[in-house]
Amino acid sequence: MPEIDPTTAAPATAAPPPASGDHFTAADIEKAREQEKAKLYGRISKQDEKLSTLQAQLEDVLAERKAAAEQATQLQAEREDAERKAREEEMSVRQLLQTKEQEWNDRFAQIERERETERAALEKDRQFAELQGFVQRRVREESEAGTIAPELVDLISGNTPDEVEASITLLRDKTNSIVANMQAATSAVAPPPAPRGVSPAGYAATGPLDMDSVTKTITPEELRAMPMSEYAKLRPALIGRAAAPNASHGLFG
């Protein structure tokens, strides 16, 4: 605390003028001055004590405010940290649920796709059986009519009834051409041998793909668009997998 300069303090009260007829010596005047200085210093000392007390109280108040501010800052940091952890936990749970939901949706979609593939395979096999029956009936009719050479009967084939009919027409023309050539070459034509059988649906029982395992996934769209000639080669493997007991992954999955 800055000290008060006595020279700047209020001037001491001047000694009362001596009564009429009284005279003061220099010692009296000096004594009066000392007394006034003592009074002034006493007041200054009391003010210094009061100021020191106020200064100490102010420092206490400031220290309390600082401690309160530090505690408030710590509480705010703890609250923010707790909120952050709660958000992270909530986010983790939400992400876990989303991941599981996506996995379930993917699995359901896979199962539905497998069922669709099975339905497409069954429909394809039904069409294949119908075409088989049609080819066998037409082979029998053409064999009984003798319009196609026995050596050519088993060449009747096609992916659709129209293609089968086109194949029959072509083989009839070839038969007529063969007969005409034989008649032109010799006047005696031996009776035709007994008709040979024909493989079901006009397709060979074995082929280059029959022994191959079906390694790739066949989609319903590919099955629906697959020609019967190609389906006939893959059918044993496909039907074998479809008929497997307790299959847990679908026909082609």
Image: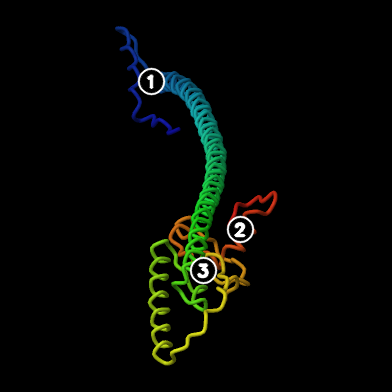
Q: Which mark is residue 239?
A: 2
Q: How many marks?
A: 3
Secondary structure, mark 3, is helix
Query: Is 142 above or below relative to 22?
Result: below
Amino acid type, residue under disc 1 in the picture = Ile
Given residues 6 and 119, the one toward you in this image is: 119
The answer to which image quadrant residue 213 occupies is bottom right
Amino acid type, residue under disc 3 in the picture = Gly
Disc with the residue nearer the chain's start (3 vs 1): 1
Residue 41's spot in the image, x, y percent? 45, 23
Which one is closest to the eye, mark 3 or mark 2?
A: 3
Residue 238's spot in the image, x, y percent? 59, 60
Disc with the residue nearer the chain's start (1 vs 2): 1
* Residue that numbered label 3 is attached to: 202
Which color mode does the image show?
rainbow
Disc with the residue nearer the chain's start (3 vs 2): 3
Residue 167's spot in the image, x, y percent? 41, 71
* Residue that numbered label 1 is attached to: 29
Given residues 134 and 41, the one toward you in this image is: 134
Using the rendered image of the protein, determine whether residue 253 is visible from the camera's viewpoint.
Answer: no
Relative to 102, 186 lies left or right:
left
Query: Is 42 above or below relative to 178?
Result: above
Q: Residues within 10 Å of mark 2 (few under 14, many from 20)?
A: some
> Which residue is found at the position 70% from the left and 51% from the top?
245
Secondary structure, mark 2, is helix
Question: What is the C-alpha distance between the residues marked 1 and 2?
Answer: 139 Å
**Quarter of the picture holding the N terminus:** top left
Question: What is the C-alpha distance between the residues marked 3 and 2?
Answer: 19 Å
Q: Residues within 10 Å of mark 3 (few under 14, many from 20)?
A: many
Amino acid type, residue under disc 2 in the picture = Ile
